[in-house]
Image (cartoon, rainbow, N blue to C red):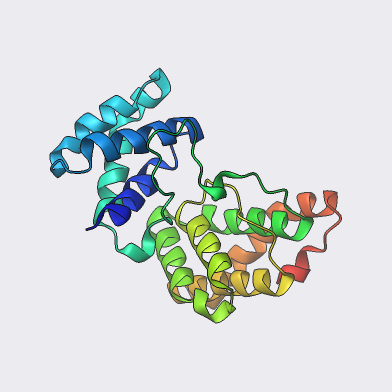
Amino acid sequence: MNLPLRRRAIYTGLKPYLNTTEMAQALSMWETEFSLKPPYALASFVTRCCTTDELRRVRTQILRALITAIESPESLLLSDPGSQVGKRTLTDEDSDTIVLDAKNSIFVALSGALWNAVDEATEKSIIDFILRNLTHLKLNAKQSQKIKDWFISRNIAFPCNFELATLQRLINLNYIALCEYYGPVKADKLLSQATHAVEAEAARQQFNLHDLL
């Protein structure tokens, strides 16, 4: 595994836990001190990353996330943030805050409601199904990478405002995956429950929720 690919794995594992400043420091430390060390050195790396009580409380989870990322196929890793050596804050362009319009904001809420209705293993399977079928959306390379990164690490900000047709296809992929795992009857029920859960927010943003379906 070459340096950029290993850096992507480290970035993917750390992304849910570190802010941009902590991430830049962690990636810089990893590249300069740990990138050539054997895998068991990850425990020491994580210990040094956990500089606050909040991070120390989830140290084991962070280590597990890094190990999982390192063992994951390249297709499930976030894009390379680039070398952060000597930088004070993460320069990855995806760290910028995007102001979502109503349809994209409601898409995020509806997707979250759907995934919250299933167990963790099924959620991962649904996401894997969507990632395998992203090529059908006919996005450009940059858009495809951004949406892929969001699906892999869904606690990061939604990357950009997509067209309604793209969002409809993504919801449809969610629904197809639900049908595969639960059958159409339960899939319809889960979609109905998720729709009901975000109706109030859609009304507040003056967006017709059914435009996504």
Comparing 5 with 104, the one in front is 5
In which image quadrant can residue 30 be found?
top left
Which residue is located at x 29 percent, y 44 percent?
66
Which residue is located at x 55 percent, y 73 percent?
173
Give coordinates of residue 75: x percent, y percent: 37, 66
Give coordinates of residue 86: x percent, y percent: 40, 33
In the picture, measured across the screen, residue 101 lies left or right of residue 143, that is right
Q: In this view, which residue lies farthest toward the top?
A: 53
Q: In this view, which residue lies farthest toward the right?
A: 206
Give coordinates of residue 23: x percent, y percent: 43, 36
Q: Which corner quadrant holds the C terminus?
A: bottom right
Q: Which corner quadrant holds the N terminus?
A: bottom left
Q: Is residue 170 above or below residue 15?
A: below
Give coordinates of residue 49: x percent, y percent: 33, 28
Q: Is residue 29 above or below residue 191?
A: above
Which residue is located at x 58 percent, y 63 percent?
190
Q: Is residue 42 above or below residue 173?
A: above
Q: In this view, which residue lies farthest toward the front?
A: 86
How many numbered markers are drawn?
Answer: 0
